[in-house]
Amino acid sequence: MTNALIISSGKGGTGKTTTSVNLGVAMAQMGMEVLLVDAALPTPDVGLHLGLPFRLKTLNHVLSGDSDVTDAIYIHDSGLEVLPASIHLGTFTDFDPEELAGVMGEVKDYYDWVLIDCAAGLGNEVVKSIQSADKMLLVTNPELPAVADSFKAVQVANEVSTEHVGTIVTRTGRFSEELTNDEITAVMGDTAGVITRIPEDRNVPRAIASSEPIVNKYPYSPAAMGYKMLAAKITGRKFVDDRSVWDRVKCAIRGY
Ligand SMILES: Nc1ncnc2c1ncn2[C@@H]1O[C@H](COP(=O)(O)OP(=O)(O)O)[C@@H](O)[C@H]1O
Ligand SMILES: [Mg+2]
């Protein structure tokens, strides 16, 4: 049975797109059929993270009735399938969230997982997108404003009966005053508690700059290992550390 998992946060810039892309690629590398939908229509970055070439058909065209959904899905080298949104402002219109649910309904059965990268904030589109998903993964940073905004998303999910997968805390280790897992779980509640931390890793912006997911570009860097472990945890599979002895030596030399 397909699981539609929305990656949400309340606040912008917490790492939703980085998480959606790398979780999706890690799941695809584990042999699963995964579709990543870029539902962050105002800030459509998925294609940039993955280095997708310019596309004539996008989710925007599907939502405006100008394309079939199958013509707007692209296969990344990793095996991850992607329904990108358009980077052109001209094709941006407020979308009817019910239509997004309809689009997903057309293709959902072909995949093990449909991941939905959503926009920041809790506007109508985001609320309806959370409602149309089966499960929600929260992405926050270890700072009070980010956690408080994420808690609003928890309340929305509770109201519309979307199941919680839990919260991941990204960009950790930057400063000593950051919130602990226990403190964040105390705000979110046990059902949406912290399931993992993804450390601050300079390889993340380096990978984005080269338009490659970090799990491909720097597969044994701290953030990439975190995303691969997260993929195993969410899908209920065992995490396999496939580093050779030489890879372990290189990691030790680099200090991770
Ligand atoms: N683990 C990390 N280490 C370092 N930088 C990160 C990490 N995760 C995300 N970032 C940076 O944070 C910024 C925002 O990430 P992004 O995924 O675009 O957030 P969102 O989609 O929530 O707006 C990006 O510039 C990215 O390089
Ligand atoms: Mg984003």
Image (cartoon, rainbow, N blue to C red):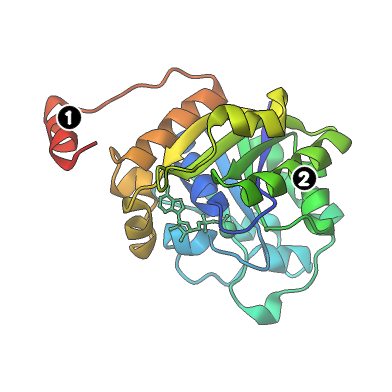
Classify residue 194 by image quadrant. Answer: top right
**Drawn side of residue 27 relative to residue 166, left or right:** left
Measure the alpha-carbon separation of dots 2 and 1: 41 Å
2 or 1: mark nearer the eye:
2
Residue that protrudes farthest toward the bottom in the picture: 90
Secondary structure beneath label 1: helix
- Report the disc number at residue 248: 1
Q: Which residue is mark 2?
A: 152
| Residue 105 visible | no
The residue at 70%/67% (across/down) is 60
Residue that protrudes farthest toward the front in the picture: 177
Q: Nearer the viewer, residue 62 or 186?
A: 186
Q: Is mark 1 within 8 Å of ligand 1?
A: no
**Drawn side of residue 145 relative to residue 129, left or right:** left
Q: Nearer the viewer, residue 133 or 169?
A: 169
Q: Position of residue 128 (x, y in %)?
A: 83, 50
